[in-house]
Amino acid sequence: MPSITHLKIVHSRDCMLYAQSTPGRITPLLAVAGIAVWLGAVGGALSGFPWPATVLLGMIGLGLLAEIPLILTSGAWLMIDRQRGWMHWRAKQWPRTQRESFSPDRIETLEIVRRGVRWPGLGWWELLLKVDHPRLRRLRLGWTPRLGRVQRLARSLAGKLATGWLDEHGLLHVGLPEAPGRGEEAPAAQAATPTGCAERPPLLPPPEIQVEARGARTRLVLSNSAEVTRGAGAFLFYALIWCLWAWSSLLIKGRSFGPPRVWDGGQSWTMGLLIAGSLVGLFLLVQALQTVLGEQVLVETAPGEWLLERRWLGLSWSRQNLEWKRQGWLRRIDPPGEESGLWIPGRRYDIRLGAGLSPDALAWLQQLLSGGAGPDTPAITFPPTPKGSNSNSPG
């Protein structure tokens, strides 16, 4: 299992950064590998393999499946927002949960270090974030075998976070804001804040929320924070048990009944039921993984109208219009808590948005969905998006 201090940058923009370490992304591979090894053990037992080898394969398969709950309850999230003046760190590593919030002024610098064997082609470069904190110290934001790539990433992040970076020789470079590309207009001059960032309206999306532009539409991606609820975890466990039972029974009966041409009526019905049960188990497993690992995407279809998509593996698995205005209420539960999130009334059940997001992000979403701000508050705004790219690209 990778360390929770080894993060991956999900997206970044001026004065904001969102990075996370989510080992749960390998859950589908573990589920497939565990079930495959278990079925191999069942097939080996039916083929007369030695019992020690069969038992060993079965234990390996069950061990792979047992890793899934531990992986899903581990992870880390780093949110830096210099405009609002906070830095959030959340870490889950069974059985402990860590939450830290402090000022982004504790950021010391970015540093490029070399790891691995120092022979040509056998090492790699890491970009570390050094923090003046007694329990964090250093966080890895990325790694690459190419020095030029990690230098470009350090230069980009240093400009966005208003800090410096140390190169591979220990020389300090001062981070500068990125210049507009060819054909792009420079932003209007704005007063600088004490944090080194331009003065912006206070209702820009927090770093946890990724903003995408698709033509005239705005898409808000709520990154999955691996805050697995008891219901979702139980659903995944039930789907795995169903798959083990159904596919093992199908394999055992298929070997005992022989080829299909010799089946009688009862055997045909039995095999048909087992095949149907195996397909149902596959459907339940895919639905459980999509529920646990999928992300929510809000699409603006019209002013004040939003469509909720559930996306996993780059595919949209469901779409639902948010019609909460008919009921006239929204319920917000701030973390920590089992039911934290923004609850919206639906036709058949309440919809939960942003499970595990920070209170600032939930408040921003609530104000956005409720129609923006009041007369004395700046309107909801989004960061400018360069042509042909997402606004939160790491660069």
Image: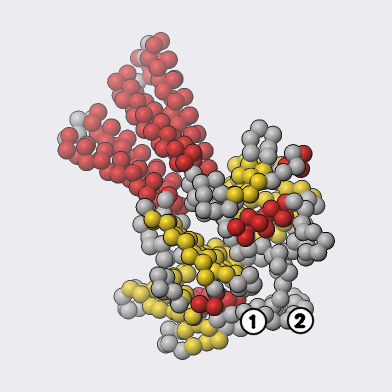
Q: Nearer the viewer, residue 368 or 271?
A: 368
| SS of the residue under disc 2 | loop
User: Label 2, on which residue?
Assistant: 189
In the drawing, what numbered circle is on residue 194?
1
| Residue 196 point in image, percent of width and height | 63, 81
Q: In percent of the image, x 35 and y 14: which residue is there?
A: 262
| Residue 105 point in image, percent of width and height | 54, 78
In the drawing, what numbered circle is on residue 87?
none
Label 1 crowding class (10 Å Cα cut-off): few <14, some 14-19, many 20+? few
Q: Amino acid at mark 2?
A: Ala
For the residues labelled 2 and 1, say whether their Cβ atoms are less than 8 Å apart: no
Q: In percent of the image, x 77 and y 48: which residue is there?
A: 305
Q: Amino acid at mark 1?
A: Pro
- Asked if 33 appears above or below 91 in the picture, the reply is above
| Residue 201 point in image, percent of width and height | 73, 69
Q: Nearer the viewer, residue 262 or 349?
A: 349
Drawn side of residue 1 relative to residue 327, left or right? left
Asked whether residue 206 is in view, the answer is yes
Q: Name the residue furthest bottom.
A: 171
The image quadrant of residue 146 is: bottom left
| SS of the residue under disc 1 | loop
The image quadrant of residue 124 is: bottom left
Of badges 2 and 1, the one in the foreground is 1
- Asked if 112 appears above or below 294 in the picture, the reply is below
Drawn side of residue 75 relative to residue 213, left or right? left
Q: CA distance from mark 2 to mark 1?
A: 16 Å
The image quadrant of residue 85 is: bottom right
